[in-house]
Image (spheres, helix red, strand yellow):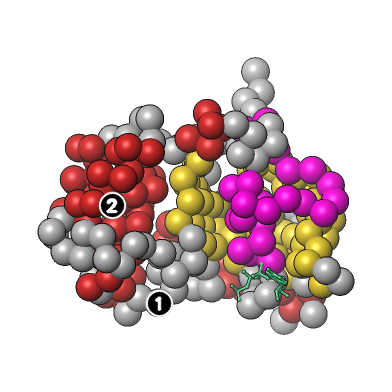
Amino acid sequence: MTSTPVLEADGLGKRYGRRTALADCDLHVPPGRIVGLVGPNGAGKSTLLQLVCGLIAPSSGTLRVFGTRPAADARHLARVGFVAQDAPVYRDLTVADHLRLGARLNPRWDAPLARRRLAEAGVASDQKAGRLSGGQRAGLVLTLAAAKRPELLVLDEPAAALDPLARSEFLQNLRESIAELGGTAVLSSHLLSDVERVCDHLIVLGGARVQIAGDVQDLLAAHHRVGGTIVRTSSPPPGALPVTLEDLVLSYLGGAR
Ligand SMILES: Nc1ncnc2c1ncn2[C@@H]1O[C@H](COP(=O)(O)OP(=O)(O)OP(=O)(O)O)[C@@H](O)[C@H]1O
């Protein structure tokens, strides 16, 4: 029996006026993966994530989320949680207000999970959201997305602005949240060390196109360093060396220039 892919893109493209943000993207993400979406500034990462959440529409090709058009109806919307870039909050509302809003707006709201996750992030419920530190705010926004119990959690550079300690704590919170939800997550990041720590599936975007995508273990097993070059081969020559995730990403991004 084959399970429906969480994400499936076929020739997906997005233009903003004459600017091409994504072109000819084919993707297939099976359920249960934690996907790292990487690529340089302007590669199209936010565009892809916004397409997945149905915030914008494709210019060409198709994108299916759980086998159907993104944000097709209220039930479909409830299956996807989104943490937008810069972790937006209502600055004048307290943390508790945010939780009350979440409970009102989401049919599957999990209040005990929200309380646990907030405690994990060290966020007090009487604090105004505008007064939280960057790490606490990221923790609040992650909590709000996770407590709706989405089957797909989408995060756009959630830890980009955090200092190394706050980032490490956030990533731990993220891993635990994903494990608790038991679904799929897609997270964009410039930090390959974060991707290495959290993700088991990789999508590399460069020049508006998918340069390579697949399960991290399969990709690492299929590539080798031969001399000064990274090659994809199932029968590596004698002396070929294993590659790291960073080797792999940089070699594909180099080719996209
Ligand atoms: N609303 C918009 N209107 C016009 N152009 C846009 C819009 N949003 C994105 N773009 C352009 O589309 C391309 C892809 O942008 P996108 O934000 O998706 O990239 P990104 O990989 O998320 O970049 P970053 O890592 O800097 O956040 C860029 O050239 C960008 O300037």
Q: Where does the N terminus fall, quadrant-wise?
A: top right
Query: Taking the image as drawn, is residue 191 in sight?
Result: yes
Please provide percent x and percent y for residue 23.
Answer: 82, 60
Residue 54 drawn in magenta: yes
Name the residue at 82% across, 54% down: 59
Magenta stretch encompasses residue 188: no
Checking the image for residue 161, the label placed there is 1
The image quadrant where one finds ligand 1 is bottom right
Q: Is residue 99 left or right of residue 7?
A: left
Compare residues 56 and 166 and report the one nearer the observer.
Answer: 56
Q: Position of residue 140 (x, y in %)?
A: 29, 58
Identified by mark 2, the residue type is: His
Q: Dividing the picture into quarters, in which one does residue 246 lie?
A: bottom right
**Which residue is disc 2 drawn over?**
98
Q: Quadrant of residue 256?
A: bottom right
Q: Residue at x 63, y 47 (%)?
A: 54
Which structural element holds mark 1? loop
| Placement of 67 over or under 121, stated as above or below | above
Q: Which residues are magenta?
A: 44-67
Quadrant showing the C terminus: bottom right
Which residue: 53% across, 37% down?
A: 77
Given the image, on which type of amino acid does mark 1 rest? Ala
Quick one: 31 or 116, which is closer to the camera?
A: 116
Q: Looking at the image, is mark 1 or mark 2 earlier in the sequence?
A: 2
